[in-house]
Amino acid sequence: MYVDYEYNTSDSMQGVPRYVVRTPSQEFITVPTPSNAYELVYEYYRNPVDLELQDDVPSIPQEFKHIIVDGAMYYAYTFRGDLQAAQLSEQKLAMGIKQMRSLYINRYDYVRSTVKNVNNINIAKV
């Protein structure tokens, strides 16, 4: 049975959100529709922007902007034929990318609900 949760305002179809769904229009909805205000905490990843114009701003964190310079220096030294300096710049670039990956990508996050079902809690009487 198909139920359209997105536009249903009936109180019987509202409750504690159990699922987060991405719609074809790239929006997020919760199912069922929230009956109260709930806090939704999430992480996301976005693709970096191409640096084409002189005023483009890189999307990487401020503390890793030197990695862009290391990459540019690697290509500049390679273009000039200074292979020893190019190798040093390439090593710095690889170490910077490895450090950035270890801090931002290589994490094992998981998703779990922190909603407590009050109906199933056993309360001991003292």
Image: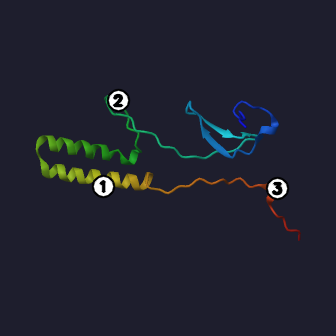
Q: Residue furthest bottom?
A: 126
Q: Are marks 2 and 1 in contact (CB under 8 Å)?
A: no
**Residue 77 appears at what percent x and percent y?**
16, 44
Picture quadrant of residue 71: top left
Task: From the image, tell me which residue sits under label 2.
Answer: 55
Q: Is residue 35 visible?
A: no
**Residue 43 appears at what percent x and percent y?**
54, 46
Tell me: residue 19, above or below residue 112.
above
Task: From the image, tell me which residue sits under label 3.
Answer: 119
Horizontal side, residue 93 vs residue 82: left or right: right
Between circles 3 and 2, the one closer to the viewer is 3
Q: Amino acid at mark 2?
A: Asp
Residue at 80% in and 55% down:
118
Answer few, some or many: residues within 10 Å of disc 2's Cα (few below 14, many 20 plus, some between 14 and 19).
few
Q: Are marks 3 and 1 in contact (CB under 8 Å)?
A: no
For the N terminus, the quadrant is: top right
Residue at 40% in and 43% down:
60
Q: Residue furthest front?
A: 1
Quick one: SS at disc 2? loop
**Residue 86 appears at what percent x and percent y?**
17, 49
For the C terminus, the quadrant is: bottom right
Task: From the image, tell me which residue sits under label 1.
Answer: 95
* Precedes in sequence: disc 3 or disc 2: 2
Q: Is residue 112 visible?
A: yes
* Precedes in sequence: disc 2 or disc 1: 2
Answer few, some or many: residues within 10 Å of disc 1's Cα (few below 14, many 20 plus, some between 14 and 19).
few
Count the marks. Answer: 3
Q: CA distance from mark 3 to mark 2?
A: 57 Å
* Precedes in sequence: disc 3 or disc 1: 1
Horizontal side, residue 84 vs residue 94: left or right: left
